[in-house]
Image (cartoon, rainbow, N blue to C red):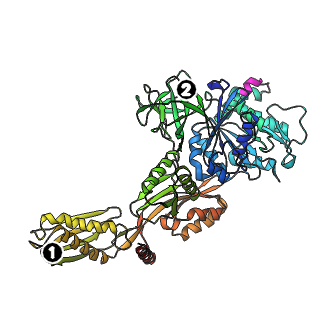
Amino acid sequence: MIPYETKDIRTIVLLGHGASGKTSLVESMLFKAGATTRLGSVEDGTSVADYDADAKEKKHTIDSSILHCNWKGREINIIDTPGYVDFIRDTITSLVAAETALITISAADGIQVNTRKLWNLACQKGLGKIIVITKIDGENIDYQALLDSIKNTLGSTCVPLVLPIGTGHDFQGVVNIFELPNPLPNKVVGNAQSAHDALIETIVSADDALMEKYLDGKEIDKPALQSCFVKAVAGGNVVPILCCSNKKVLGIEDILDTIAHFSPSPLEGIKRTAIDVQKNQEITLDASNNGHFSGLVFKSVIDPFVGKLSYFRVVSGMLDGELSFYNVTSKKVNKAGHIYRVFGKEQQPVSRAIPGDIIAVSKVEDIHISDTICDSKHPIKFPEIPFPTPMSSLAVIPKSKGAEKKISECLHKLTEEDKTFRVSHDTLTNELVITGMSNLHLQVIISRLKRRFGIEVESHIPKIPYKETITTRSQAQYKHKKQSGGHGQYGEVHIKIEPLSRGAGFEFVDEIVGGSIPRQYIPAVEKGIREVLEKGILIGHPIVDLRVRLHYGSYHDVDSSEAAFKIAASHAFQDAFNHAKPVLLEPIVNVEVVIPTKFMGEITGNLSSHRGHIKGMDTMGDLQIVRASIPMSSIASYETELKSMTGGQGSFTMEFSHYDVVPAHLMQSIITQAHAAHAANAKKE
């Protein structure tokens, strides 16, 4: 391994819409830099970046992969990330490990929905940005129109650093216009001199002294201009645009040169802040070997054979010697047997880590994504990594009997590496529910469950967690009297019920006076009612938001018992409930739908047809954001509908809002379906 220092490190995260050529670009860069001996292919399943079986099967990136190469004395860390929102969790976590975002735009497809979203994420994190136009050798490419689209959509700071020599099948390479060659090659697309002037003017605008010198017509020496270029990229004042053909490995050298010479090192990039735990104040970390060690965990991989592999970015200080560190979250000191640099699926042992390094440790179980690891004598804490709320759910049942406990354990292991995946047991429907970003995301989880742990499951759309309640007052009485040989059974209960406000739950009020029911039997009355509340009456779902008043009853000195009063209370409650105009309550969710403007009318109309209520709209560039509240039952298959209506260009998020009454014309249908399902299950049993 070639020795390097923090000043030599460049860490880039590749961002771009799915199929925009990120992984193919990584393969070309690694091959050009000599880090690999052959050019890997996504289509052929030979990519060193997409090494996971699911990624090979789907032919697109599902998890981030970390690789590195050395180019002209720079140690370049490369993080390849998924381009589809289904797997955005690794894209989000990778942003905290890099200084620069390399954003790919397909020359054939232009700026797509996720391009804009990922651009905004990079801006929010303060990363420097480089744009690479891929597939410049495709058919019917209008390079100038694409440049205009980039400037109009992403801003005037986006300026070409290279111009293509020919496009489509005639693409022969690129000419770098930072220093104009003389003479220019033939077939350069665009006005090279004009592009050069625009580039230099944009660069010097990041430095007042250089700008003044430039405007005065004075010559600016190359080292000063290069230094300003790095500063401008780091500050977002310049976003250089490059282009390439991954298949022909043309334009790749200029991309590597740009990363090596013009992207910021950890010393020049964003300043990372943390909370000093002892002083409870914010501090800024210096990427210095001499500082106290600190790192941020941003990725975990759970493997049944290798164990847990945790990845972290070293922010300050060095990790060497005994390889021990303090975990601020768990408040434990961990000792790692080894630390590794990672190259795809391979781990390469190293003896130390310096600021800017991306390192992995294995088999340290209590390290989790977002954890801060540091010097125990100087504890600090980095901000938590925020994740979007998953909105797509499936209920799962193991195909093999007796695997219920194992499936839950294995699913929870998968939540360790994926913070947009959740597992829960719905007590209302008694289902094990997995929740993720999309149905595709959940199908990958199910595939991994089988591949890694040997567990196969059946899945279906989860039952809607309805609840039952009443809308008016009612009262009832019931006398349970049964005589047989020996002691009989006797208990009489008189109750009144009334509705409570939404979310109030259940109240039991004891209004017995004069001892009509002895004190020792009162708890049995409440227990009998609570058992019915849990089981439900209309469709077998919990009953909520009501008050029961026990006001009278009778007993027998010999035949009364707790069991008799439980039975009497149960029957009395069921009778009162049925006369209190019972209704079903359904969960209402808030949704936020992001779509291109051209789909606005269709989307709002579709939401309204699903009993949705439009609550507001916003504009984000050429995208529209629609906010609405809608019944959960109406949106169970909305992911599929939205993809169909927008050609995959729309996305949405969802969160629970409240419960509301099911309309009367729908309630009877739900009750009929529930009774039919119960009857069918009874026959199976």
Q: Does residue 501 belong to the magenta stretch?
A: no
The residue pinned by badge 2 equals 286
Residue 206 seen in this snapshot: no
CA neighbours of label 2 inside 10 A, class few (<14), some (14 to 19), many (20+): some
217 over 486 or under it: above or below: above
The residue lying toward the viewer, choosing from 176 and 399, is 399
Q: Which mark is residue 490?
A: 1
141 over 429 or under it: above or below: above
Residues drawn in magenta? 218-226
Residue drawn at the location 62% of the way across and 66% of the way down: 601
| Residue 562: quarter of image | bottom left
Q: Position of residue 669 (x, y in %)?
A: 45, 77
For the C terminus, the quadrant is: bottom left
| Amino acid on which disc 1 is placed | Tyr
Q: Position of residue 467 (x, y in %)?
A: 38, 67
Q: Position of residue 52 (x, y in %)?
A: 62, 47
